[in-house]
Amino acid sequence: MIISINDPQTFKTKALQWANSFDVCCYLDSNNFTDPYSKFDALVAAGVKHDLAANAGAAFDELENFRKSHPGWVTGLFGYDLKNEVEDLTSSHPGELGFPDLYFFVPQYVINIQGNKIEIIADNPQQIYETIQQQIQITTDEQIPPINIQSRLDKPAYLDAVAKIKQHISRGDIYVTNFCQEFFAAHADIDPLTVFLKLNEISPNPFACFFKYRYKYVLCASPERFLAKRGDQLISQPIKGTAKRGGTNAEDESIKQQLRDHTKEQQENVMIVDLVRNDLTRSAKAGSVKTEELFGIYSFKQVHQMISTVVCELQDGITPVQAIKNTFPMGSMTGAPKVRAMQLMEQYEAGRRGVYSGAVGYFSPDNDFDFNVVIRTILYNKDRKYLSFHAGSAITYHADAEKEYEECLLKAQAILEVLGQTKSFFQT
């Protein structure tokens, strides 16, 4: 059933409110960014017909079988610790959030929003439409109660870890790595839907998502695509390179030009592009991997980003799940060489990444897929009242630890604002 609507934004919010009434839902929002690879403006998946929860071991094989049994719409998430299945790696840090490493579900209801057209896939689409329209739209005016946010690494410990990581780079162990730090609150009582709506209002990004898995939530304002499949083409768009927004148009343009010409940012970006190209060769037809765009500068409400686009033709016989496994975890969140970088980050990071550095997205009935990179994201366990978010940056030989710390705070700025904090909170 396809319906024309007058106010897509209001309908999206009401549809999300309705979806949140289910134990499980997935809401993906492009926030109206122009993207040649997107299939829709927003997708709402609610309720569970069938689902799969698995931890690292044989999770990708389980998903392969699950996908064969359910070739229609399937939405879900990959956690970072699936690295332990893909490579000979381990994770020793405690995880307080309790997400499985992999979770996918076949939704009872799917709503596809494109412009002012909505498609409702359900046995009773008219009833679903009327129920959504009857929702009383919530506001984001309500103040969030104070939250005591702590850091797993204080600033001196962070600076010391960066110095040690740079010693590994000097020795030639790695060239670049993504070093992440966790901020958390142990007794956080929030309304996840309100927090997500505020986050999406402050920092609207093209790969935003609200994912509810019973009492666990992913509240995501990601600007980054991990991997998409369109027909026989794979598309990856790694982000490496971040700069603040300017106060005026002239300052903004100057900052963009500085980012475009910044040697360190270009080095970070090109090293990860090379890694992504290498990952894609495992799934690509020979000679088909190419960099479609290098060092593209894209502006978002909070920051400017340097984004490159790498594409290839999918090799015959490689399934969508295999293509994802062949590139997971994404190069922008690991480093190069990939395995050694992940080993070292397990040593120097103080918290478990979990869903952070993973991916959320969908498989569609035509066997395409699209997954984001879980960054700029609040993870929340409502039952345990545990809230967590990470921020990371690329460490290279030329990295300045103070500036990398500032970049982490810049990336966390929208989350800090939503949770009522300020940048200075972490400077002590």
Image (spheres, helix red, strand yellow):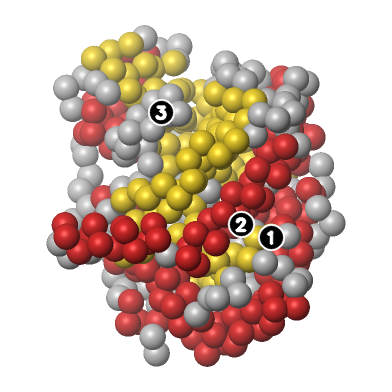
How far across and how far down the image is residue 396, in percent?
59, 71
> Which one is in front in this view, the residue at disc 3 or the one at disc 2?
2
Which of the two discs, 3 and 2, labels the residue nearer the N terminus? 3
Going by the image, does 157 lie left or right of 87?
Answer: left
Q: Quadrant of the C terminus?
A: bottom left
Between the C-alphas of marks 3 and 2, the distance is 25 Å
Q: Which residue is mark 2?
A: 271
Marks 1 and 3 close (CB-CB < 8 Å): no
Q: Mark 1 highlights which residue?
A: 336
Q: Mark 1: few, some, or many residues within 10 Å (few <14, many ≥20)?
A: many
Q: Are marks 1 and 2 in contact (CB under 8 Å)?
A: yes
Please name the residue that numbered disc 3 is placed on.
36
* Residue at horizontal 39 percent and vertical 57 percent from the top: 260
324 versus 257 height, above or below: above
Query: Residues under labels 1 and 3: Cα distance?
Result: 29 Å
Amino acid type of disc 1? Ala
Q: Residue at x 26, y 50 (%)?
A: 201
Asked if residue 232 is positioned above or below residue 428 in the image, the reply reads above
Q: Which circle's residue, 1 or 2, is located before the other in the chain?
A: 2
Instruction: Tell me if I can see residue 200 in this picture.
Output: no
Q: CA distance from mark 1 to mark 2?
A: 7 Å
Amino acid type, mark 2: Met
Residue 306, percent from left and from top: 43, 53
